[in-house]
Amino acid sequence: MEYIVSARKYRPLSFDTVVGQTALTTTLKNAVKSGKLAHAYLFCGPRGVGKTTCARIFAKAINCQHPTAEGEACNECESCQSFNEQRSLNIFELDAASNNSVEHIKTLMEQTRIPPQLGKYKVFIIDEVHMLSTAAFNAFLKTLEEPPAHVIFILATTEKHKILPTILSRCQIYDFERMSIRNTIDHLKHVANQEGITYEEQALAVIAEKADGGMRDALSIFDQVASFCQGNITYEKVIEDLNVLDSENYFKIIDLAINNKVSEIMVLLNGVINKGFDGGLMIQGLAKHVRNVLMARDPQTLPLLEVSDQMRTRYEEQAKTCQISFLYDALKLMNQCDINYRQSSNKRLLVELTLIEIAQITQPAEDGASAGRKPRQLKSLFKNMIQQQKPKNAAKQVAAANVAASTQKLAESAKEVSSLNSSSQANQANSSSQANSANQANPKLSLGGIGFSWKKLRQQDNGTQKSNMQIIPGSTNMPTGQESTNSAQFTQTDLEYQWMAMCNRMPQKLSGIATRMKNMNPEITDFPIIEVLVDNDLIKQEIEDIQKSITKTLQIYLRNNQIKITVRVAEQKEHIKILSRREQFEQMAEKNAAVAKLQEVFDLELA
């Protein structure tokens, strides 16, 4: 006897036997009963959910001569018999994947002109319709919009987004859903009972989960597992045949994590990896497991679990032992691990660290160091070690490190010393640095020649200054400390020069306001008061946010600590019009006739 795979042998022959598409089949049956049939239908959805099957059942029911009261085909009339024996001349199936050219569509259009020999309608089922070329779609448009009265088109596709909108607008669209785990398990039970195969419900749940919502895939996996198990489908044999990670591992990991048993989790992870399973897939499976445990905590969310009854009971039992905060934190950690997994160069270490952190969520704040610590608890982990060692030279080493770091920062900020400084002052600064390096045990650094004290520099590095009066660092024309405290005179030219130099030295985070400041012209109104005109209140606010730093910088570089800055929004008459390139050229030509003459002689064009 010829063997037929389960996906073909148990293919539904009526609407009532279609699994998991109750809403759609009810709509189609009502259309058959009422006789209100559209000229074009589009069945779309993932693979193996019954699109082509429903198209065939619908086509048979449309041409049935004696349909039942429920809208089903009678399977007794000549039309139904010819369809069942695959000799019907009124129902045509076209595979658009291999017949996707304009010529194939034109041939199909010619067949629509011939009326049906038996029954009311000619039904054309076009499978994988998204594979048609654009030219074929365009050739199909007119006939699809206004077909002959005896023609009905049923289109099926797995990728609706690839179909032209003009085609979609001419069809009634039916979206098929993925099969739920429960529906798949029930159908597999029916098939197993028909075939005389014994099974464990948990094993069928693994098959349903592996099928990922496709009934055809589930039946194909069922045939594979049935051959492997030789008529007795058990959970152990299914996970062995399908190479699926046993869910028991997930239950063990959560139980061990609640009890902070990091070592045992590492041993379990090593066994899983040695069996050939990827660490990233294990993290994904564990995240799904924790999500199911979270859903099992509340009776309202319990129906969201698409598992067998036995597994639902186990999830409920473990949910009673897990705090909700533990589940939230564990999900967050595993989600972060999943995000970083692809970019990680040491994937196993990333998985291990994630499992360690999960095992430490419920760990007390103070415990033995052997249990491990999360990063935020490293201080308490090494607390005893630090107290035992107590190195005598620890303070000296810290001071030396601070001196070296601060000296390096100072050297970068004062790289080019002003030409006003004497060579003796430069030598004095260098000798001070050398003396400091030689005597790191008791660091004392005198930087008076450069205008900074060691105390002030260290406060600036630590961010402990209470005042916002920080200068904008520069690399040229750095004044000395004595000169910065004078009330030196300066001109408008000096002010504009130092203003532009300050804008060029401003850090990257202030690049936007620095660009605007370059277009400003500060003026000395009542010496040493400087007025800055801005265009609007928004720019004024940005200037005022750093006004103290600007003031302090100009006081130092202009050597006048009496300088004060005022910011004012310019009045309408004070706004300066920004000229375009052509306006600038015309203005130059008016002032100097030679410019216009030059353009005329050389026939120049403004770029």
Image (cartoon, helix red, strand yellow):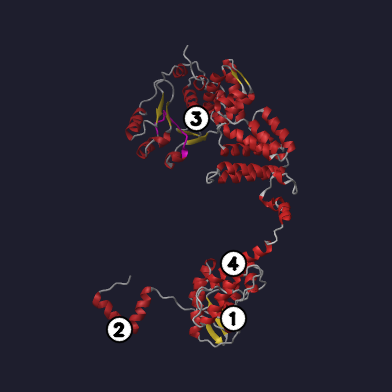
N-terminal label among 2 and 1 = 1
Give the amino acid type for the residue marked by disc 1 in the picture: Gly
Residue carrying label 2: 593
- In which image quadrant can residue 86 be found? top left
Q: Which residue is mark 4?
A: 404
Q: Is residue 150 magenta?
A: yes
Q: Nearer the viewer, mark 1 or mark 4?
A: 4
Residue 569 appears in view: no
Of circles 3 and 4, the one toward us is 4
Q: Position of residue 448 (x, y in %)?
A: 60, 79
Position of residue 154 relative to residue 224, above or below, is: below
Q: Nearer the viewer, residue 380 or 216?
A: 380
Task: Residue type at mark 3: give it.
Answer: Lys
Q: Which mark is residue 51?
A: 3
CA gap, disc 1 and disc 3:
85 Å
Q: Nearer the viewer, mark 1 or mark 3?
A: 1
Tell me the element at label 4: helix
Magenta span? 147-160
Label 1: which residue?
Answer: 481
Residue 322: % across, % down = 72, 39
Q: Are marks 2 and 1 in contact (CB under 8 Å)?
A: no
Q: CA distance from mark 3 to mark 2?
A: 83 Å
Residue type at tag 2:
Ala
Mark 1 secondary-structure assignment: helix
